[in-house]
């Protein structure tokens, strides 16, 4: 797409609004588009550039602030500052596929010479934090559990855009049927390698306008998220709780696994999130779901279910650091302090949710984080305090579900290894009363 003064200015305005990161990037961008009625080409350019800048922010800041000869000789005095304009231009030539000749008409004095140095930056010579595009505090945390090579591999994988995964609603359709319909529409799609009800689309399409979506036959859901429901494996007439249901993506999957029988409680502390479940519920054909607004994990409504539930899914509030392919701003919006606060909340939620289970019941604790302190350490501390629970190896449960995925005690998914978001899950069973 041709970069004009108008288009560059739109990108700069969007970056000015988003880079302070006072709010989630996708939310700020949505408001930006509401305030600026622009064409679809411009929207695509702005969105791609904004998220591209967030994915590669540390390298772009290094390039903008570098003291290369061309930059210091020719560029204006403000040249060594990572302004939204310079971040956008650096992104275009480094990652956006533009050459200097294509964008020269919009450049100011000295910018062409500086951008030539940006193209020449050798990333492999830069610190690990810049190569991995992960802030210092996060790399330090990860070093407690990962080698530098693993950190780099995870970081590089998180710099790529995520594919569009969808889940087939087995109440209304079969995967082969949906694949055939997609192929008939000339949409490139393939079966996901691990989830038996998942489909991966090659390109991101406006799925919410497609009949498959409006008729409730498919829902957008990462393959890793689908595996959480398969670990829980609810039976048809079970009593099941989705403890942190949110907008209900996993709730709907659990209902389909139960063939819309038994009873499925969708609990959440957010009225808005549960309201977002309603239209999805209507489309899905599910009739066994009971949304339930709770004030906190120890709400009286929760206590009334104690000892009565067969299966509990705890998709705990977490840092979201496993979803950086989709939400690259999270690595700048989280901090050591926010992680510490989250771990306290995770431990409290897990303890409360565990009380719901009857003897022999199963609980799956899950996050979309890659940090052990939100994952293994929460589970280990819980097991130390609850001798009536045991850890069932996730690899064994996957094998029972005929899922060809080698795992040990825990489900640990990584984009560079599995093509999914970063997920963690532990299967806990209540063996005592």
Image (cartoon, rainbow, N blue to C red):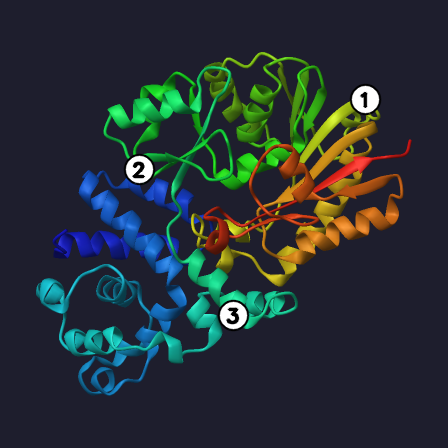
Determine if residue 247 is in view: no
Using residue 370 as the reference point, say whether residue 12 is left or right of it.
left
Question: Which is more N-terminal, label 1 or label 3?
Answer: 3
Report helix, strand or loop for mark 3. Answer: helix
Quadrant location of the C terminus? Answer: top right
- Res 149 label: 3
Image location of residue 76, percent across then percent down: 21, 79
- Residue at the spot 65% in from the left edge and 28% down from the top edge: 233
- In space, the residues marked 2 and 3 are separated at their CA atoms by 42 Å
- Res 34 label: 2
**Where 402 falls versus 139 (above or below)?**
above
Using residue 296 as the reference point, say whether residue 17 is left or right of it.
left
Question: Which is more N-terminal, label 3 or label 2?
Answer: 2
- Residue at the spot 82% in from the left edge and 42% down from the top edge: 390
Q: Nearest the camera: 402 or 286?
A: 402
Q: Residues within 10 Å of mark 1 (few under 14, many from 20)?
A: some
Task: Kindly give the residue lying farthest to the right in the view shown.
Answer: 433
Report helix, strand or loop for mark 2. Answer: helix
Determine if residue 126 is in view: yes
Q: How many marks?
A: 3
Q: Nearest the camera: 426 or 215?
A: 426
**Where 347 falls versus 220 (above or below)?**
below
């Amino acid at each position: 797409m041709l970069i004009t003064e108008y288009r560059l200015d739109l990108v700069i305005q969007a970056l000015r609004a988003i880079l302070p990161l006072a709010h989630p990037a996708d939310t700020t961008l949505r408001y930006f588009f509401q305030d600026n009625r622009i064409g679809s080409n411009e929207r695509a350019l702005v969105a791609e550039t904004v998220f591209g800048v967030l994915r590669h922010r540390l390298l772009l800041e290094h390039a903008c602030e570098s003291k290369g000869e061309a930059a210091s000789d020719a560029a204006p005095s403000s040249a060594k500052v990572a302004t939204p304009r310079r971040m956008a231009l650096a992104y275009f030539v480094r990652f956006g596929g533009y050459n200097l000749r294509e964008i020269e008409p919009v450049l100011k004095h000295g910018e062409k010479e500086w951008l030539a140095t940006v193209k020449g930056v050798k990333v492999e010579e830069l610190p690990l934090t810049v190569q991995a595009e992960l802030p210092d505090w996060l790399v330090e945390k990860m070093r407690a559990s990962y080698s530098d090579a693993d950190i780099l591999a995870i970081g590089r994988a998180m710099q790529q855009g995520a594919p569009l995964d969808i889940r087939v609603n087995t109440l209304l359709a079969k995967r082969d049927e949906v694949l055939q319909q997609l192929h008939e529409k000339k949409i490139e799609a393939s079966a996901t390698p691990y989830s038996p009800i998942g489909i991966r689309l090659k390109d991101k399409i406006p799925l919410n306008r497609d009949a498959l979506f409006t008729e409730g036959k498919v829902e957008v859901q990462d393959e890793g998220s689908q595996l959480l429901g398969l670990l829980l494996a609810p039976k048809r007439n079970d009593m099941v709780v989705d403890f942190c249901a949110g907008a209900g993506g996993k709730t709907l999957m659990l209902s389909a696994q139960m063939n819309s029988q038994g009873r499925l409680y969708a609990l959440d502390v957010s009225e808005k999130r549960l309201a977002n479940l309603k239209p999805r519920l209507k489309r899905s054909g599910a009739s066994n779901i009971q949304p339930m607004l709770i004030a906190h994990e120890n709400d009286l409504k929760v206590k009334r279910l104690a000892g009565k539930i067969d299966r509990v899914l705890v998709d705990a509030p977490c840092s979201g650091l496993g979803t950086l392919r989709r939400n690259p701003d999270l690595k700048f919006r989280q901090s050591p302090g926010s992680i510490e606060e989250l771990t306290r909340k995770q431990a409290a939620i897990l303890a409360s949710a565990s009380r719901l289970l009857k003897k022999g019941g199963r609980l799956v604790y899950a996050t979309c984080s890659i940090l052990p302190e939100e994952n293994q350490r929460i589970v280990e501390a819980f097991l130390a305090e609850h001798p009536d629970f045991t850890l069932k190896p996730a690899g064994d449960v996957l094998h029972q579900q005929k899922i060809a995925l080698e795992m040990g005690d825990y489900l640990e998914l990584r984009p560079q290894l599995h093509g999914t978001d970063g997920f963690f899950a532990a299967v806990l069973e209540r063996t005592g009363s």
